Amino acid sequence: MDPELSVVVLCYRSGGAARSFAARISKSLLDAGIDNYQLVLVGNYVPGSGDTTPDVVRELAAGDPRIVCSAVVKQGMMGWDLRSGLALATGQYLAVIDGDGQVLVEDLVRVYRLLREQGLDLAKTYRRQRGDGLKRKLFSLVFNGFFHVLFPGLPVRDINAKPKILTRAAFERMNLQSTDWFIDAEIMIQARGLGLRVGEMETEFLGLTGRRSFIKFAAVFEFLHNLLRYRILEFRRRGKE
Ligand SMILES: Nc1nc2c(ncn2[C@@H]2O[C@H](COP(=O)(O)OP(=O)(O)OP(=O)(O)O)[C@@H](O)[C@H]2O)c(=O)[nH]1
Ligand SMILES: [Mg+2]
């Protein structure tokens, strides 16, 4: 029987921490009475990097019938990992969450309930408190501001926040192509284009522990460039219809 809810956990370079994170997710789902779930642990790796995550996620998948994993050589960044996880997910509802400890595990159940109770196609969080610093808060303000200028009307405050949960039907109507961090925006742009029912709830985002942020100032320009590119692509597509 297909699971009710698949949770794609992005575990890139999380090593042994993936164990406790997966256990916390399982516990939180079981405590909420969601026992027909699936965890898709994404531990894709860069060859020669000494990353132990692939072994950890393979071992977890071997020991628990509810867990599957992706542990292949990376051919892209976050978006590629996210898509490889979604491709393995068989649930009726599909959730995506970062496995680096910044997202609250409890948000999965809260967002899932919001989606089910309000009959949404896509539900997500928005981050009021951010533990990752003022710089990131400013990046986020600029990015979300531009998003709404270029793609008006979507009732969301925080494009990049996870977890995001969507119905399988909504996911199957999308055609996600991004292989980097822009995939969060791509999901929301396509949700807008498809006229999906979208809902958001407040959360907190924790600071990073154990490593430095991967996001550099240049990422803002890359995001803005991608937004413009998508805007033009959508105008062209509409023009042809
Ligand atoms: N940095 C990085 N993360 C990846 C990659 N592939 C998948 N991921 C996952 O993407 C998730 C989100 O990326 P993050 O880099 O943490 O994004 P962020 O939280 O906005 O930025 P940070 O400040 O770097 O934490 C992480 O939990 C990783 O597991 C990759 O190639 N690089
Ligand atoms: Mg992070």
Image (spheres, rainbow, N blue to C red):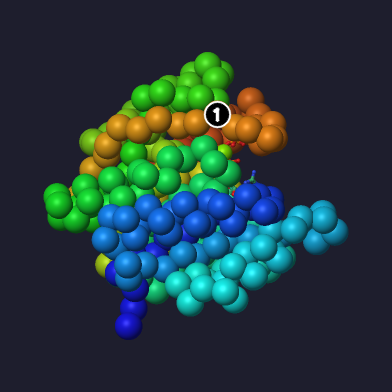
Is ligand 1 closer than 8 angstroms to the Cβ of mark 1? no
Which sits in the foreground, 61 or 69? Answer: 61
Q: How many marks?
A: 1
**Location of the C terminus (image quadrant):** bottom left
Q: Nearer the viewer, residue 41 or 36?
A: 36
Tell me which amino acid carries mark 1: Gly
Q: Where residue 189 sits in the image (x, y, percent)?
A: 36, 46
* Whole-percent x, y for residue 31 in the image: 32, 55
Residue 236 visible (yes or no): no
Locate ligand 1 by image quadrant.
top right
Side of 151 relative to 130 (left or right): left
Q: Which residue is mark 1?
A: 207
Work out whether residue 228 can be spotted.
yes
Name the residue furthest left. 118
Q: Residue furthest right?
A: 48
Tell me the quarter of the image containing the N terminus: bottom left
Q: Nearer the viewer, residue 212 or 17?
A: 17
- Residue 74 image offset from top left, x and y in percent: 69, 61
Which percent across, then down, holds residue 54?
A: 69, 64
Horizontal arrangement in the rendering, residue 172 relative to residue 53 (left or right): left
Does residue 63 sit above or below 19 in this rendering?
A: below
Furthest residue to the top?
134
Q: Residue at x 64, y 70 (%)?
A: 58
Residue occupying the point 54% across, 41% down: 101
Q: Tell me which residue sits at (31%, 50%) in the image.
A: 109
Write the residue at 34% across / 39% down. 125
Judged left or right of residue 160, residue 29 is left
Local crowd size for mark 1, using a 10 Å CA cut-off: few (<14), some (14–19), many (≥20)? few
- What secondary structure is marked by label 1? loop
